[in-house]
Amino acid sequence: MTDLEHPSLAPPVSSVGIVGWMRQNLFSTPLNAGLTLLAVGLIYFLLVPLFEWAVWNADWRGSDQSDCTSGGACWVFIRARLDLFIYGFFPTSEYWRVDVVFALLAVLIVPQFFDRFPRKGWIGLFTLIGFPIIVYFLMMGGSFGLEPVETGKWGGLILTLVLAFVGIVAALPIGIVLALGRRSTMPVIRTICICFIELWRGVPLISVLFMASVMLPLFLPEGVNFDKLLRALIGIVLFQSAYMAEVIRGGLQAIPKGQYEAARALGLGYWKSMSLIILPQALKLVIPGVVNTFIALFKDTTLVLIIGLLDILASVQSAIVDPAWRNVSTEGYLFAAFSFWVFCFSISRYSQALERKLQTGYSR
Amino acid sequence: MVSIAGITGVILFLEIRDSLYMPPADHGSQKVAPWNDPKVRSVVFQFVALITLGYFFYTIFQNTLANMERRGITTGFAFLGNEAGFGILMSLIPYDETYTYGRTFFVGLLNTVLVAGFGIVLATVIGFIIGVARLSNNWLIAKAAMVYIEVLRNIPLLLQIFFWYFAVLQALPSPRQSIAFGGIFHLNNRGLYFPSPIPEAGFSYVIWTLVVAVIGVIWLRRWARRRQEITGQQFPVVWVSIALIVGAPLLVFALTGAPLAWDHPSLQRFSFGGGGRMIPEFMALLWALTMYTAAFIAEIVRAGIQSVSHGQTEAARALGLRNSPTLRLVIIPQSLRVIIPPLTSQYLNLTKNSSLATAIGYPDLVSVFMGTTLNQTGQAVEIVGMTMAVYLTISLLISMFMNAYNKKIALTER
Amino acid sequence: MKKITIGLLGATAAFSMMMGSVQAGTLDDVKRKGSLTCGVSTGLPGFSNANSKNVWSGLDVDVCRAVAAAVLGDAGKVKYTPLTAKERFTALQSGEIDMLSRNTTWTHTRDTSLGINFAGVNYYDGQGFMVSKNLGVKSATELDGAAVCIQAGTTTELNLADYFRLKGMKYKAVVFDTSDQSVKGFESGRCDVLTSDQSQLYALRIKLANPGNAVVLPEVISKEPLGPVVRQGDDAWFNVVKWSLFAMVNAEELGVTSGNVDSMKSSANPGVKRLLSGDAGKKLGLNSDWGYNIVKQVGNYGEAFERNVGKGSALKIGRGLNALWSKGGLQYAPPIR
């Protein structure tokens, strides 16, 4: 007798393939089915008109208002004013300097997305320290035969990037010092740090920017004054360093007490044990937090429009009130929103990937 | 400013007191030179830091005084008693041009508290719904929630406020073509108009009934809990509470002959008059704040629920609990411990973000007091100081309240 | 830790040395910097407005340029700081800007308690109302219950309150930060009326999609003398700004224009001589060609007026109150002698 195994029956049609997937994921219970139908309806009534307006009926080509005739979105407007949104009022002949900054940034960022890129750490360090210096000389000009460009002419996307990048790079060391200070055993230092952190965290950024932009010279001796952009940056950095300190404090707290004790047992002093044992571990833990702070800062840079700096949102604002264009506010805001979204979303994805990768330490 | 100094002083006092009770460090038998003694070093270091900081603040203070005096800027808080002379679009307390600058402070403050308060409640509700939807086993719902979260939290709030105000609300029809909802609500580019209730004689009974009902419910809950602890019997607290709070006032309302009239808005020369009105600035700000913060809260809720291990659900099932009690009695109480701390910082963010009102002209504290009043009086230092102190105080109050709540629900281990 | 202590001490020392820096007046400051920082509006055609290349022009901008021409010999050496009405006085008080030329109304409170000085009047104005034509309003007295768009932090806000209170009417003030936003609010129908100084109304009307649809009502409800502003307590600088403006008005009175200034240099008229050369500049702490530079590079008051707000502009405002005193207006500059 041959031992013929009976072939197993194919699963019922209703549990495999698209039908099966839909039964399981969309219509598993009457409630779920209702929700699904509701969601489909909503998506249909929201997305279809949006698609028609933004893509199907939109005007893409042309140079001015008269080319926007179809009743859909007028993307011609974005095309026509794109230079303003990216470069601000940077002199046209010097656009290449901004382009170099963008290109350099892209080249420096790419290695961070690969796991085993040679000298990845050094490139990262250079991005944080060397890159801002290059950008400074490139953008300011006045040396190396470059024509000086005053900061009042900086604007658009490049200004947004400068504000966010400098904000985070300068806030990091201050944040580390504050976080260490907050966990110090010295009561005076700890109190100063707590007060500093809570003070900055408790007030809105626009009041800080207002103070930095119009009131700061009042606090300084007569005749001492500096650039408006620099003053805004000081405000942003101080504000951000308080948030950064709290992120880093979280990392410091996550280091088990044994590490502190082991460092002391080796005879290391405070600074040595911090810089050699604790901080390297803690900073690795807080990288995702730092990246999230960066996203928050990136979005917060829009507030500089309230003090009259021309960031990307402000340049959109100023372009949509131009009488040469009519009713382009939705297009303008959508463009600005999309630019921010692309940056923030990709950074947040990066941070999540990083979080998964770095999840090796003390989480139980 | 005084409050900041006071708080600093209290913290400093507590810290120093604590440090005095610290056990003395053991330096071993060898005597160390004073400059190598950690204790001496620490004292010197702190002393130097304090002196530096004090000197820093002193010079700033001196500079400011000198600068203000040289430029002949009026100082002091006397301006708060002067007549303001300008109108404010929306006020929760009686206000017109004849009131003082001090009054404008409170008008702005209340408007800030109003938008922040509504924003916190709405953002929490929407955030919880979306956070749960994110974990739904319905694929479409879960993805829709994810898209909502990823889109809204990656776009700057200011941009969202501008979008809702300039692109959406200002595109609404004019009062004459307003969108009517059943002839009761009218929506147009001047705002949302709705009938406002006018209490008549006897309405106070309804209010009193409500107060009594609330007190009754509080007492009932305590009693039911005690009874359950002693006898193990459950009492349908929720249903009885709802019946008491909703039913009793309604009954009294009917018995007293419905003592409530409605003031319906009607079209007048320029716009609607009468009734209640929600200005578009308020709607845009509240809407944007709510939608933005809800995206963050949804993520917090998701993380909170996911932090409760699946074993808890299985254990609850094993005990014979059904879906709803599992969620209510097992999952949510545990996830709240993870949710509350980040939720607190979202509340703080929302409150501070409400200051963006100034960009669209909603008369909040920054817009009215740090805006118009500052401009009319020119006393920047006093006014900005007061404004920052208010936000600091609100932040500290929210933190205190949420910390207390967190402590209450924290795991009490035996 | 020792290093940090030393660092802190060093920082303190550096800080205290910084404190001891010399306190110079604004005039020396501007000369040293080689540029004038001038506070202007965020965009108001005819008075101070930047085109898409960020080049500023307008009647108020011309005052800044005249001062730069007088002090630095080059009208182009101005850095413009756009300010909202709310920020302007704080920015001036704090020293963020050297002078403010931003259609600012000269009032008693501002002059006495803000620590600022008004250096003359470059435009006599009054507050008016603009309404949409299809509203059918003919007079400001018919505006009871209207929603009014205004710019935050202006005298307009106060005048409006006074006017409506006096007439026993009610209004709702919709307050925006910039004039662009208030125009947008008016255009979208958020408010029925846009109120501002009349000159501004004409300027803002050309920003509307359909300027013909809006009418400016006849009523003028206030006096609005607009002029450049400087910080109090710096008399040398106050004089420079004041006399730069007067030089423009005097030049018009004397018939000196940017076109004929070179030939007028050899004029026999002693008044012209004192304006274009002579020691008037020295007494202000400037070069003797200060007046020449102003007229040559910026023009006289009449030229600036016609170019920016008058016949040569989109605004087409008549001279009216701003004509010379000899032609029935109010522009009257003290003589240079």
Image: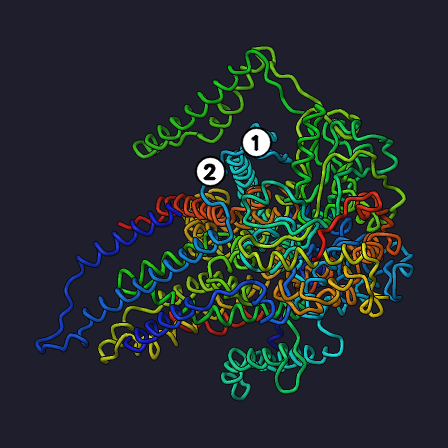
Asked if residue C227 lies left or right of residue B102, the reply is right
What residue is pinned by disc 1?
B92
Q: Residue at x 71, y 70 (%)?
A: C74
Instruction: Evaluate if marks 1 and 2 touch, with contact meaning CB atoms under 8 Å apart.
Output: no
- Residues at marks 1 and 2, CA–CA distance in whole angstroms: 24 Å
**Which numbered mark, 1 or 2, is in the foreground of this view?**
2
Please say if B202 is above or below A350: above
In the picture, residue B155 is in which quadrant?
A: bottom right
Q: Is residue C286 above or below residue C104?
A: below
Q: Relative to C127, is A360 on the left or the right?
A: left
Q: Where B74 sits versus A206, above or below? A: above
- The disc placed on residue B78 is 2
Residues flagged by tags 1 and 2 on a common chain = yes
Q: Position of residue B47 (x, y in %)?
A: 26, 64
The three-letter amino acid code for the residue at tag 2 is Ala
User: Could you say whether the residue bearing mark 2 is in a helix, strand or loop?
Assistant: helix
Measuring 72% from the left and 62% from the top, which residue is drawn there? C66
The outermost residue toward the left is B29
**Place of residue B142 in the rendered image (x, y in percent of width and height, measured from the top left):** 62, 55
Q: Residues within 10 Å of mark 2 (few under 14, many from 20)?
A: few
What is the chain identity of the residue bearing mark 1? B
- Percent position of residue C114, x then y: 55, 47
Which mark sits nearer the N-terminus, 1 or 2?
A: 2
Residue C324 image position (x, y, % from top left): 81, 48
* Residue type highlighted by circle 1: Leu
Q: Report the residue at 51% width, 87% height from top.
A: A119
Q: Residues within 10 Å of mark 1 (few under 14, many from 20)?
A: few
C206, B59: nearer the viewer: B59
Front-most of residues B395 and B50 = B50
- The answer to whether one can see residue B414 in this image is yes
